[in-house]
Amino acid sequence: MTSPIVSTQWLAQHLASPALVLLDVSMDKVVGREPLVYSHQVYIPDTQQLSLETQLLDTTSQSANSFPTVERFNSLMVDLGIDEQSTVVIYDNQGIYSSPRAWWIFKTMGFNNVYILDGGLPQWLIEGREVCASVDIARDGGTFTASFQASALVCAGVGGH
């Protein structure tokens, strides 16, 4: 696949694939728009949760939303059962809100087989697809090792250069 986005139809057809790792990266705090609010939390079946606010960041940094270290990212890959053969699909409960950031972090860490679910959970629900009330237990045993791609980051220097 060449697009960073997969359709809900594609995901529904591949949910049973043992190589698929489905991650909900929804954020508790939605900024800059009116958040979608759910009466009860639901997930696409076989979803694991990965928090951008507490996990996919540098836990030693004082900065909010800091980029995770390679070591932190590798640890998460082990915890989530992600290896070189995995196909990771990322979604969030706002449509497409926090999933692009998670996608970008994966790409920057050298994991290329990662995709964003087009329309996220809201689109999945609009189509009446199956959901469940809880997330999957982490799979453990992932072997992917990050290869930081510095060229994916642009840092503003002093004076805005």
Image (cartoon, rainbow, N blue to C red):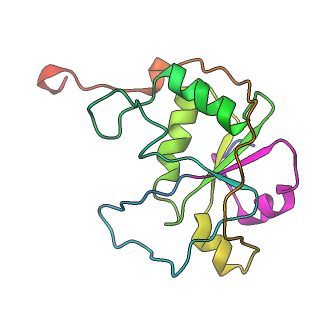
Does residue 108 appear left or right of residue 77 in this picture?
left
Q: Is residue 13 magenta?
A: yes
Does residue 91 appear left or right of residue 113 in this picture?
left
Q: Quadrant of residue 74?
A: top right
Given the current orientation, which residue lies at the most extreme front position? 137
- Quarter that holds the N terminus: top right
Picture coordinates of residue 75 (x, y %)? 60, 27
Q: Is 62 or 26 nearer to us in this picture?
A: 62
Q: Quadrant of residue 155?
A: top left
Does residue 10 appear left or right of residue 88 in this picture?
right
Above or below 113: residue 52: below
Instruction: State which region is magenta.
Output: 4-24
Does residue 156 appear left or right of residue 118 in this picture?
left
**Residue drawn 80% across the image and 63% down it:** 12
- Quarter that holds the C terminus: top left
**Residue drawn 66% across the image and 20% down it:** 145
Q: Is residue 103 magenta?
A: no
**Residue drawn 45% across the image and 29% down it:** 68
Given the current orientation, which residue lies at the most extreme left position? 159
Above or below 21: residue 119: below
Picture coordinates of residue 11 (x, y %)? 77, 59
Picture coordinates of residue 88 (x, y %)? 70, 43
